[in-house]
Image (tube, rainbow, N blue to C red):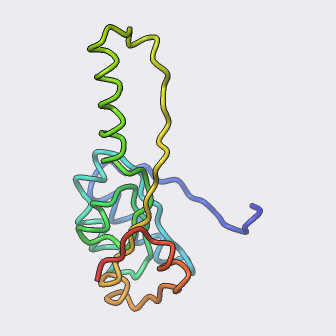
Amino acid sequence: MALGLKVTEVNCRDEDEITHAISAAASTPGAGLVVLPTPFLAVKRDLVFRLAATYRIPAIYPFRYFARSGGLMSYGIDTLDIYRRAASYVDQILKGAKPANLPVQAPIKFELVINLDVAKAMHLSVSSTLLARADEVIG
């Protein structure tokens, strides 16, 4: 609790659980959402966007496409960079390297995307410092 934050983990398995979790968060002053990269939440992202906007809860998502499709902001790996780096693995394997002998590589490029259109619709202000750090600003 060094930052004085209270973290509540919620595992959502259906739309009702998403609705309940976000409406419950709305009753907590200063609440925000960190949406994790799960296939279920990727499919249900429009519902999460709509509820976050309705309750005016800032949310951050794991991939650029979330911010581009209606989320407030995203911070996560640059998936194109991962694909580009994978090409070197393919090259080494095609030249005879054993996959088991290749080192595991962690992501090295991360990106912050802010959707100002969503921020304005939610009546949220985004600091100029955060905007300056963003890799992409939408709107």
Q: Hey, which quadrant is residue 35 in on the image? A: bottom left
Quadrant of the image containing the C terminus: bottom left
Q: Hey, which quadrant is residue 65 in on the image? A: bottom left
Q: Nearer the viewer, residue 74 or 121?
A: 74
The location of residue 117, given as percent across then percent down, is 30, 84
- For residue 110, side relative to residue 83 (left or right): right
Instruction: Please determine whether, in this image, residue 21 is positioned above or below residue 138.
Output: above
Q: Which residue is at 51% across, 72% downward? A: 133
Q: Nearer the viewer, residue 38 or 67?
A: 67
Instruction: Please determine whether, in this image, residue 8 is positioned above or below residue 38.
Output: below
The location of residue 21, given as percent across then percent down, is 42, 63
Q: Which residue is at 74% across, 61% downward? A: 1
Instruction: Please determine whether, in this image, residue 86 is positioned above or below residue 33.
Output: above
Q: Which residue is at 28% across, 52% downward? A: 14
Q: Nearer the viewer, residue 114 or 71?
A: 114
Q: Which residue is at 48% across, 71% downward? A: 25
Q: Nearer the viewer, residue 31 or 94?
A: 94
Residue farthest right in this picture:
2
Q: How many labels, in total?
A: 0
